[in-house]
Amino acid sequence: MKPPSAWAHLPFFTQEWPGIRDRLAHMDDWLPGPERLFAALEILRPEQVRVVILGQDPYPTPGHANGLAFSVAPDIPLPRSLRNIFAEMQDDIGRMPANGDLTHWARQGVLLLNTSLSVPDGSAGAHSRWGWQKLARQAIIEAQGHAAIAFLLWGGHAQKAVGDLPRDQDLTISTAHPSPLSARRGFFGSHPFSRINDWLIKQGNRPVDWAG
């Protein structure tokens, strides 16, 4: 569980991480596990981040979480929120990925970061007060030091956690969460994928191939 080298200078890794690491070391079952804990930060360096999508914590079902927010292993049926995300994408750009593994988004500069990077088996939100949220904020601020960023903030949790970070030069799309409980309150019809790509093109950047 070594911090990713490109992000290891963040204050979190000298202040909060030692305590979190020790707590995890005394637990038998937690997700996504040591090898995938920092997956979102291992794929991207700060200067590569173009889009931020913030989740809450990993899926609490063994075998589902792969360390990227909203993403699941390729052979896992789509969770309900991800199913709604893909439905909105189909409506927005006419295409959607073949499965729920969003690694291809991350490789194109989309930081898929949860505000908590660990969760016990079957206990969603149980590590939300461990101090993980400081890492999400510090990582985003570090990325902002390199370029303007598109923020896709789905739901009150993401908006409360980092909603004060976007600057005038950034793009912010804040809507209801894609959960079945809230998707019809403003998530559906928001067309976030085409809006982000239009903005990226205006910035002189490549659009994201969302469907892979």
Image (tube, rainbow, N blue to C red):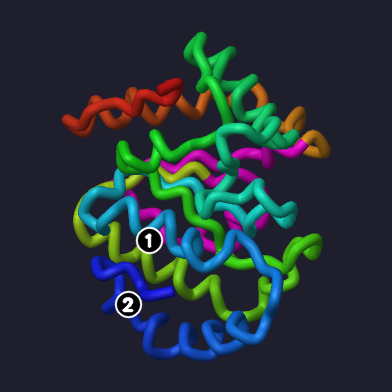
Q: Which residues are magenta?
A: 153-179
Residue 186 is drawn in which quadrant? Answer: top right
Q: Quadrant of the C terminus?
A: top left
Q: x and y percent of residue 155 in the render?
A: 66, 47
Q: x and y percent of residue 35 in the render?
A: 47, 63
Instruction: Reply above or below: 134 against 176.
Output: below
Residue 90 belongs to the span the image colors magenta: no
- Residue 181 is labelled as none
Q: x and y percent of residue 52 in the render?
A: 42, 48
Residue at 62% over, 32% down = 75
Instruction: Reply above or below: 189 against 2.
Output: above
Q: x and y percent of residue 128 in the render?
A: 67, 72
**34 vs 125, nearest the viewer:** 34
Relative placement, left or right, of 123 versus 171 is right
Disc 2 marks which residue? 10
Residue at 64% over, 20% down = 87
Disc 1 on helix, strand or loop? helix
Name the residue at the left extreme: 204
Residue 170 belongs to the span the image colors magenta: yes
Disc 2 on helix, strand or loop? loop
Instruction: Reply above or below: 165 against 152.
Output: below
Relative placement, left or right, of 164 versus 154 is left
**212 vs 197, nearest the viewer:** 212
Residue at 31% over, 37% down = 108
Residue at 51% over, 68% down = 34
* Pair 2/1: label in front: 2
Disc 1 marks which residue? 140
Mark 2 burial class by Cα count in 10 Å: few <14, some 14-19, many 20+: some
Q: What whole-number distance in Å separates the C-alpha atoms at marks 2 and 1? A: 11 Å
Q: Amino acid at mark 1?
A: Ile
Q: Amino acid at mark 2?
A: Leu
